[in-house]
Amino acid sequence: MIVGQDFAYCGDGRTFFAHFAIVDEIPRDQKLYYSISEVAKITDLEQYVLRYWESEFEQLKPAKNRAGNRIYTNREIKLILYIKKLLRDERYTIEGAKQVLKTYTPEADTGEQMELIDVPKSRTKIKDELLRADLGETKEFLQELLKKLA
C-alpha cells in the first residue's frame, strides 16, 4: 500500500481518497474500508436499511470510491451498531435516536478489526418422513377442529 497525504493506493488497483491523520498507527493487515455488503454482514442488517439510515442520520455519511460505491470505516460501523442498538434494542423512534445521537461521541479508534457475522442459513426442508407425517396429521386434525368450531 502506498499512502500519500490525501490518498492511499492499494496493490490491487484500488485508490481511496481520504484524509489520514495518523497512518503509521494502522496495522498493515487491518482493513481501512469496508463495502456495504461487508458492513451488512458485520452489523446483521440489510443493505437497504444501511442506505435508508444514511438518509436519516446526518452523522452517517460513508465516503464513496471512484466507482460511487460506499466505503465504510470502523468508526462508521460502530455508529451503525449504536444506531441499531437504539432502534432495535432500546426501542427508540428514529426521531428519538436522532436526539440521542446529538450527544454521541464515538470512541477513539482502537484499531480493532471488525468481523463478519455468520449469516444463519435459510430453513432446511423437513427430511424426516415420520415428522412430516406427524405434521400432516396434526394439520388435518386442526382443520377438522376448526370446521366443528365454526
Image: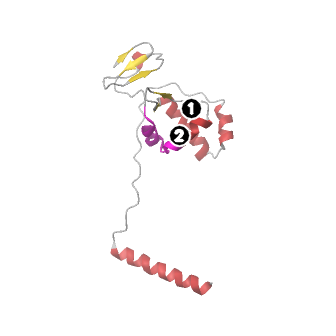
Q: Earlier in the sequence, mark 1 or mark 2?
A: 2
Q: Is residue 136 above or below residue 1?
A: below
Magenta stretch, main secondary structure, is helix
- Could you say where residue 75 lies in the image, as x and y percent from the top left? 50, 29
**Where on the picture, by quarter, is residue 34?**
top left
* Marker count (numbered): 2
Q: Is residue 41 magenta?
A: yes
Q: Is residue 100 above or below residue 65?
A: below
- Residue drawn at x 43%, y 29% as measured from the top left: 67
Whether label 1 touches label 2, CB < 8 Å: no
> Which amino acid lies under the numbered mark 1 shown in the image of this protein?
Leu
State how far apart marks 1 and 2 are (Cα): 9 Å
Write down the residue under mark 1.
60
Category of crowding for the residue at label 2, using alpha-carbon neighbours closer than 10 angstroms: few (below 14), some (14–19), many (at least 20): some
> Which amino acid lies under the numbered mark 2 shown in the image of this protein?
Leu
Residue placed furthest toward the left: 11
- Residue drawn at x 59%, y 30% as measured from the top left: 59
- 84 left or right of 95 in image: left
- 85 left or right of 10 in image: right
The image's mark for residue 8 is none
- Could you say where residue 149 lies in the image, as x and y percent from the top left? 61, 84
**The one of 104 and 148 positioned closer to us in this rendering:** 148
The image's mark for residue 50 is 2
- Residue drawn at x 57%, y 35% as measured from the top left: 54
Q: Is residue 40 above or below residue 21?
A: below
**The one of 53 and 30 positioned closer to us in this rendering:** 53
Q: Which residues are magenta?
A: 34-48
- Residue drawn at x 47%, y 45% as measured from the top left: 44
**The one of 13 and 90 positioned closer to us in this rendering:** 13
Residue placed furthest toward the front: 67
Chosen colour scheme: secondary structure
Where is the C terminus found, in terms of image quarters?
bottom right
